[in-house]
Amino acid sequence: MAITPNVYQIHKEHHELIGLTTLEIIELIVNKGRKKLQFDQIFDPDELSTFQRDDFTYYLFLMNTAEHESDWSDFLPEQLTEGNDFMQQKLSLLLFVETEFQLYVVVGGSAYMLIIPYIDHSFGLTAYDRIIEPDKDELTSIRTRGITGQRIGMNEQFRNEYRIVNFTRFGKLPKEIHVKLCRESTDLYFPRLKSKERERLQLTVGAGFRIGKNLDFDGLHQLIEDLALVATHPPKEYLSSYQPINDNEEVYELRKLLIHKLYNNLAFIYNGSRLASDRFDFDFCNPNRIDLFYEAETYQLKEKTEEGGYKLFATLDNRDDIFRRVMDQAVSTVGMTNEYKFGDYLWGVHIAALKGDKVTTSSGFMFHFGAEFSYKNSPVFLIDTKWYFLKDQFITDLITNAQHIFRTYRAKPEILKFPWDKEELAQEREYNHLYDLEAGYIVCDALIVDGVELCDVLYYDKKGLYLCHVKAGFNSKVRELTNQVLISARRLKEATNGKDSSFLDRFYDKLVNSGRNYDDLTLSKFKRLFKKNINYVLAVASTLVEDLPVEDHMDKYDSNIARFSLIQCSNEMMATYFPLTVYQIPRYEDLA
């Protein structure tokens, strides 16, 4: 008999397994699994069969479920079931393999659920990352998880000879990969598993590591030997340049760090502290539905009561006021002297976004934050409630990709022709309104239709239409800016495709009633502007003491959130909506 084994690795650093021997680990896994299955039987070492081969020790555990009647007996008519035996029993098999440093396991039957809590869920991917040849290995299919909430997951299939190197991995967390190894890697790492001289092995890697061919026991033993050798190679960090943090204790510590940042930020909010440690840069948005959160008409703020329910303490119509209003309520309720009580209160605050009387999305206040931190001397992302360690390669990719966007997709300087002197124009709105009486410009700042701000400044010429979104600073606030760009682009795409043609009518009415200049365009002429080539412009101005170009001074503009958000936005705009260019607004006339 031959099987196609999927090899998993027990995560011996799991908090329940630290310090245990192999036999103690097996006993814990079996007992916990039996308890989950509501079996009363306790593990007995005599249930294990043990076998030594070379330097490896094999441990076999078998478990039969209780005999029960198959569901088919109820499905089929009596004329077919009469006289037939529909009693069945399932075999569960765990084959543990102890090497010098690892504890592997192969599953048979329905035993996978027993090991789920205790395996390294990135083992297969990590093992492949040690042997990957991006420009030679052929990608068959891949399942990924988006690092942000806009795109939860994707399954992609590829034609023959599609190389790993051609797959854009940025912003995606691989979950399972089907790949055909190049001949050199097959010969180097798995030479004795080949059946033919020029064979290239097929791999499926995710939580487990599987060779796409049937193996007898000798073949399985050889695969384990090969995996143990692969584990000695350093990772190339090509697939996983950021690592999700799943350890409950670390997540708990990081949540405490978030509270600490918010607590220190009170000194900045209420006392005008200029200490860098008191200022907290973050993005604030619903973690599940960004579009519904931005497009809401009102926001209900609720706090937990002593009885366990919630009571409303504020209703707002501007999402930008939510954070300060919650801080005011927290200080009024628990004061500013006890960080623990302050944090406990915030975890009990709930934010609901409404359109009319209908709640469109809701979540806890503390789940709305996006920010970056330093934890254990390493950079950490908080994005859409998920925490990620950033590896050096990820930060290198961020810098390289962000610089490429600034240098390659640069907007024409004549579009936003005025400098932004921060000493004279403190607010973004003041800068935007410089264009109010300029021919070819329409200031759209704060004109909201269906919760959507089309742009800050609209500019048009004979060739095209430019929707400019403006922000002071290349920092974590850029994520809010990119969210606005994507939501605007989606709604405009729907309007220009005829799916929501009334959107531009309603926006025009809002513009006319605002009293701002609109070049006396009629509705039909205004809508005709959107027949031109539509372009989006993401514009930022430096908030540093010296007005340094972003693309040449990334070490000074050190926000990984800003870089990441820009890259994600650029990719999605070009793939789905309209061309996006970027522009750094000069601060002074002589730099314009």
Image (spheres, rainbow, N blue to C red):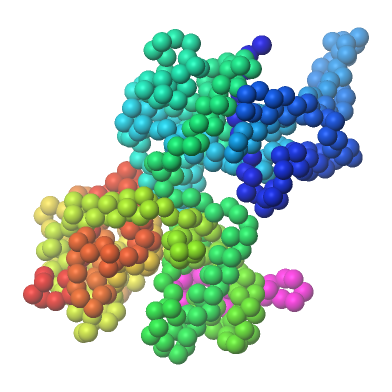
- The image quadrant that residue 4 belongs to is top right
* Above or below 110: residue 370: below
Looking at the image, residue 551 sits to the left or right of residue 166; the answer is left
Looking at the image, residue 590 sits to the left or right of residue 478; the answer is left
Q: Residue 515 at what x, y percent from top left? A: 26, 76
Decide which of 127, 584 is in the foreground and name it: 127
Residue at position x 34%, y 23% from top? 161
* Above or below 31: residue 592: below
Residue at position x 19%, y 73% from top? 547
Task: Locate the C terminus and report the quarter of the image it occupies.
Answer: bottom left
Task: Locate the N terminus and report the quarter of the image it occupies.
Answer: top right
Looking at the image, residue 215 sits to the left or right of residue 487; the answer is right
Decide which of 359, 520 is in the foreground and name it: 359
- The image quadrant that residue 336 belongs to is bottom right
Residue interval drawn in magenta? 293-321
Q: Is residue 124 visible?
A: yes
* Above or below 388: residue 264: below
Residue at position x 55%, y 65% from top? 254
Number of numbered tags placed on the structure image = 0
Q: Residue 60 at what x, y percent from top left? A: 74, 27
Decide which of 207, 158 is in the foreground and name it: 207
Q: Residue 126 at what x, y percent from top left? A: 49, 39
Decide which of 215, 495 is in the foreground and name it: 215
